Each structure stands twice: as C-alpha cells, then as structure tokens.
Amino acid sequence: MLCEERFNEIYKKEPDGVAFCPYRICPIGAHSDHQFGKITGLAINKGIHIAFGKKENGVIELNSLQFEKRAQFHIAQIPNKKQSDWADYLRGAAIELSKIRPITMGMSAIIEGSLPIGGLSSSAAVIIAFLSALCKVNNIVLSDSEMIQTALKAENNYVGVSCGKLDQSCEVYSKKNHLLYLDTLDDSYELIPQHPNMKPYKIAIFFSGVERNLAGSKFNMRVDECRSAGYALKAFAGMEYGKFEETNLRDIPFEVYEQYKNKLPENWKRRAEHWYTEFKRVEKGAEAWRRGDLEAYGKLSFESGHSSIVNWETGSPELKSLYDIMTRTDGIYGGRFSGAGFKGCCMALIDPSFEESIKNKVTEAYLKDFPDLKGKFSIHICDSADGVVL
C-alpha cells in the first residue's frame, strides 16, 4: 500500500502496523438514524488505511495522501474548538477517546483513502481507523459499541455534524455477504446472510466528480426540520415533550403523524414523510433480503432514493442525474444517493453480468449532461466486506 511506502520514505523505518476501516453503503435507511430509525447497510472492500508508528512524546503527527496540509497536535493539548481542516475529525476522536481511556502515547501516521471523498462515510471510516491505530499504540481495547460511540461523538461534539450512528455501525458490525439490519433506538442488530438462491450482485459506486463537506452542507438543517416536525406533532397531539434536541420521530406513533401531518409546514411534513416511509421500507427490505429477493430489495432502494429527492429534498443536479440514469439502466437492481446526498456519489446493486454495459451507459449518459466532469467522474465496482477488525 502507498501509505506504507510513504511512511517508510518519511520516517526511514517500517510502520508498527496498518489500521483499516471499510467504507459503507446504506441502500435503504437513509436520513433516519438521527431520529432513531432502522437501517440496512453493507461495508465494502474499499476504505481508509492508516500506516502508523508509536511516538513516546505524546505528539500525534498526521499526513494524508488526499490532503496537502500536515496536522500535528499533542494528546494533552488538543484545541478545544475545531480548526476547520481535514484533521478535525481526528482531533475530536482523540478528545473523545481520552475521556474514557488514558492516552499516553502519540503516533506518526500516513492516511490513505482508496476511493474519492463523498457519500461513503469516509469521515467515520477515517475516525475509526485512526482510533484503532491510537488504541493499538496505547494498548487500549475498545468494545464494538465503545468504538461506535466514540467515533459518533467525535463528529457530533467536535466537528458539529448532527449525524446518527448509521455510518459507524455499518463500518464496525458488518460481515461479508450479510446485510446489517440495525435498530438505532436500542442498537439491536441482525446480520442477515445472503440467501442461497439470491442472484449474484456487485456494488457499483458512481462518483459524481463533485466532492462535498458534510458539516458545511444543509445536512444539519434537514435534521432540525425533522425534529421540528416531531416537536410540533407532540404539541398537536397533547403528548408530553421536553427539550427540542431530545425530540425524535421514533417517539411519535405513525397514527399521530397521519392525524396531524396536514397541520405541519410543508417542508417539515416532507421530512417526516420521508422518515416514516423509510422506516417501513427498511422493514420490508430486511424481509426481502432474508428471502433472497434482490429485485424487491433493489426496488425499495430506488423508492428510498425517490423519497430523498421529493421529501428530504436533497440531491445536487449531478446526483439527481445519476439517480435518473440508474433507474433506466438494465442490470441495476436498485440504488440511491449515498450519504447526505448533496454531492458525492450514488451506489447501486448490480447484476455482474451487466457490469460493462452499465459502465458504458451510465458514463455516456452522465457526461452528456455534465461534459465538464469528464476526467473527474468515475465508476468503482466493489464487493461486500467485513467491518473493522478491532
């Protein structure tokens, strides 16, 4: 790996180890976890590698093959506020880890991402890979749930992204050829094995050529609108309610939503409509996967993508174009935007026998719409994979 070679070049020695965390896809269950919804997801065999070596002086020195600026900080003197650069995710991770375990050792690290940034939860993957490396040099062992919570808090508390635990859970719990079916309310989950009669599939990633910054996007606004709908619904129904930030649609029965939804402002209603219908799609999707019905699962993923456009009102022109092309392309079972959906990429479950025709058709149609993105648009074919090994 290039990160190992670069480590050797810079530090004139072999790294102590290489940490790896896979990226993830969420075919059904998007924009749901922050309100304690259910999700389905898969880790893929691409992700973040970090070559690392122990530093006994407590300094953490970070170099990324994707970003030019080097980051450096001492474990005992991490800035309390984010510095608005790529290393904020890792500063936040170090702070959160130090709250639950003593950290005495720093490290040198070279970070390498195997796909373009945007839509595959590279932020959660780099945090988890970093935490894995930092734990190893400090002889710390975290449980799966501790890793997920520590990584989540780094994004929520330090970076300021109001995400739920979908990304971290997929990247930790996933198992190759199994669908992760997770209830983010109580963290109960099931790894549903691939049915013996299920048709073969690959995972296609269509990168739009436009990267995105989640914290700077409209992601947090959508979460607030969703929560506002829940707060209003509780008031209309005479339900007890407390702090706004502790309000979640999972607390509110679907029947209450149906009764009072027309009293909501239109944008709040749409956010809630997506959440409730996505909850049902996840449950149907898990059952479709369980019986090996890839066509039904894929159809639900397409429906999820449609709801993201109409009800969640996300999707850049590039991603909407990709989504539309995917729905018209033979050999694609289903797919949607991946991640927040403002830029980044789309994912699809595809029939491997159509791989070349899918690549050709999607590329031709997309570059016809966005000729300026030639050389930036790319397609990557992946397999499902195990989650991070702690």
Image (tube, rainbow, N blue to C red):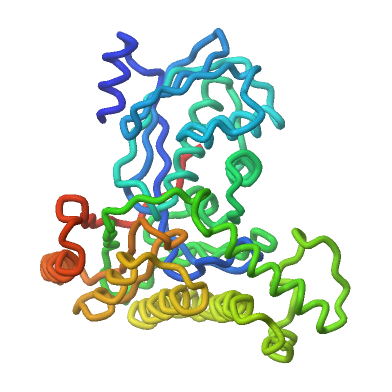
Closer to the camera in the image, 150 or 162: 162
Residue at 52 percent across and 35 percent down: it is 84
Residue at 73 percent across and 91 percent down: it is 259
> In the figure, 49 relative to 312: above or below?
above
Q: In which quarter of the image is residue 262?
A: bottom right
Residue at 30 percent across and 47 percent down: it is 116
Residue 363 spot, x, y in % from top left: 15, 64
Q: In which quarter of the image is residue 141?
A: top right
Residue 220 spot, x, y in % from top left: 59, 57
Closer to the camera in the image, 367 or 329: 367
- Does residue 340 show up? yes
Quadrant showing the N terminus = top left
Residue 12 spot, x, y in % from top left: 30, 8
> In the figure, 205 relative to 239: above or below?
above
Residue at 26 percent across and 63 percent down: it is 202
Residue 40 spot, x, y in % from top left: 49, 66
